[in-house]
Amino acid sequence: MDTIIVQNSHIENHIKNQISECVPNKKQERKIAMRSLIVLLTVVALLSLSSGCCLKFSDLTPGTTYNVGDTITTSRTNIVVERFQWSGGAWTSNGRAGVDNRQYAQGTGNDLTTDNTNLNFQFDYPIDSVSFRFGDLGGNINIRVNGNHKNEQNFINLNGSLIGGVQMTVDAFQQGNNWYGKVVLDGTINDFAVGGQELWLDDICPDP
């Protein structure tokens, strides 16, 4: 009789162990949930990197200015400040770029401004497209794609144009003398620069 009791007790313990192994307790459930969350966040991060990273300039300090020849680094991307061509055809190297938080580009945060300068974006080329929001408060604009330079009074004048073999689409509206909107460049891009006399830029999004 004693032997039977011992065997039954042994069987009960074995069953309890199997149950405890098959049914996780709350601490184990929390660990599993945390691991799943880490995996999910990693996947989201990889997907965001693979789909391109928009430059929003939130890591730059408003009021900071840059001269021609300077390099701006934002979101692990370098932007070189270059000389600017006026509407009459003459070039100037006396302009500057800056960081502004008045949101004239109507984007998501700080704007990058050009005051008679161009900004040469050093993306990981080639890319398939790039888009950006802008506020054009006066003067002419420059844009360069794949070495093809354009000098126009407004972006809207280039809507539907091919620049360096890349299709340019402009969705913009006018308030007084100012223009606000979005530019999309669609096609294989190996070089991209843009600037103006009084131009605000934001949400510059390359698509690799």
Image: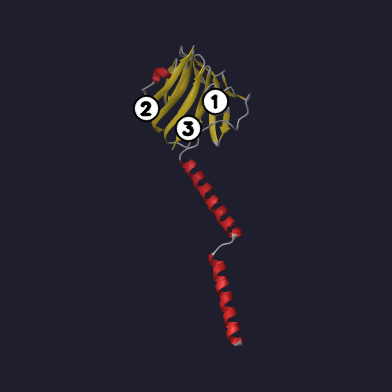
Q: Residue at x 49, y 47 (%)?
A: 43
Separation of marks 3 and 2 at Cα, in angstroms: 16 Å
Q: Which residue is mark 2?
A: 167
Q: Position of residue 187 (x, y in %)?
A: 38, 32
| Three-letter residue code for mark 3 | Cys
Quarter-wise, where is residue 63 in the image? Answer: top right
Q: Which residue is mark 3?
A: 205
Task: Check disc 3: other Cα within 10 Å, few if <14, some if 14-19, many if 20+.
Answer: some
Q: Nearer the viewer, residue 92 or 204?
A: 204
| Three-letter residue code for mark 2 | Gln
In this view, 88 is above or below 142: above
Q: Residue at x 50, y 45 (%)?
A: 44
Q: Which residue is mark 1?
A: 81
| Three-letter residue code for mark 1 | Val
Give the mark nearer the N terminus: 2 vs 1: 1
* Comparing labels 3 and 2, the label whose residue is closer to the camera: 3
Separation of marks 2 and 1 at Cα, in angstroms: 24 Å
